[in-house]
Amino acid sequence: MKAKDFDARRLDVPAFAQAGATLSAEEALGAFPRLAGESAVPDAAAPVRWQAHGETRAPLGGTPVPWMHLLADASVPLVCQRCLNPVDTPLHADRWFRFVADEDTAALEDEEAEEDVLASSREFDLHALIEDELLMELPITPRHEACPVPVRLSAADPDFDAAEDKPNPFAALEALKAKAGGGSGQPQ
């Protein structure tokens, strides 16, 4: 099978690996809705470039196992946590995946393996995997190296300042109680 025979949204992983095929594309950020949802700029035209290459590897004396190498790059405009303006944030994923027979085996072996272990499928959603890997690359606090606008480090609230100038309503109540009861503070 040739690369054109494979579909990234319904990938036959064993056949892809057996063929040693490669799939690659450059797609708009909007093709990855969860990743696009993180963008500070609606409808950002940032491209997402990815490439996946399949191969089989036979462990010593064992049956060949499907493997896939995934490379993905994007630059997503996120909200800078200092100045609150968009900051283009480069994301890069470079991962190897080994495929096993089922989810239980994948969960068991993934704990011990250096590579990621996934369940093999004849209708694997490579497109969703690409999006997952790029989402995991998002920084916790995106920010510019040097913000393009001065960062305001203090806040002034005119309503708060005006509230400080008003008399405390409880102080006025205390004055009324003192006037009525002689200020002893004891109930009459």
Image (cartoon, rainbow, N blue to C red):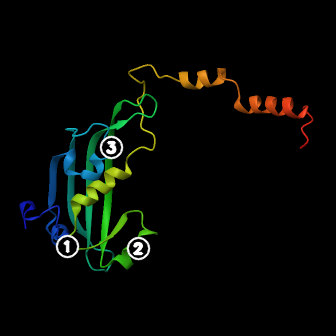
Residue 44 horizontal side relative to residue 19, left or right: right
Q: Residues within 10 Å of mark 1 (few under 14, many from 20)?
A: many
Front residue of 26 and 168: 168
Query: Could you say which disc has been placed on residue 91 in the image?
Result: 3
- What is the spatial separation of the Cα atoms under label 2 and label 3, in whole angstroms? 26 Å
Q: In this figure, what is the number of numbered marks?
A: 3
Residue under pointer 2:
107
Q: Quadrant for the C terminus, please.
A: top right
Q: Percent position (x, y) of residue 75?
A: 28, 39
- What is the spatial separation of the Cα atoms under label 2 and label 1, in whole angstroms? 19 Å
Q: Amino acid at mark 2?
A: Ala
Tell me whether the residue at label 3 lies in contact with that at label 1, contact meaning CB atoms closer than 8 angstroms: no
Q: Is residue 20 visible?
A: yes
Q: Earlier in the sequence, mark 2 or mark 3?
A: 3
Q: Residues within 10 Å of mark 3 (few under 14, many from 20)?
A: some
Query: Could you say which disc has been placed on residue 183 in the image?
Result: none
Q: Residue at x 32, y 69 (%)?
A: 118
Q: Amino acid at mark 1?
A: Pro
- Secondary structure, mark 3, is strand
Q: Amino acid at mark 3?
A: Leu
Q: Residue at x 28, y 36 (%)?
A: 41
Q: Is residue 156 visible?
A: no
Q: Quadrant for the N terminus, please.
A: bottom left
- Secondary structure, mark 1, is helix
Q: Earlier in the sequence, mark 3 or mark 1?
A: 1
Residue under pointer 1:
14
Above or below residue 111? Residue 147 is above
Front residue of 143 and 73: 143
Q: Earlier in the sequence, mark 2 or mark 1?
A: 1
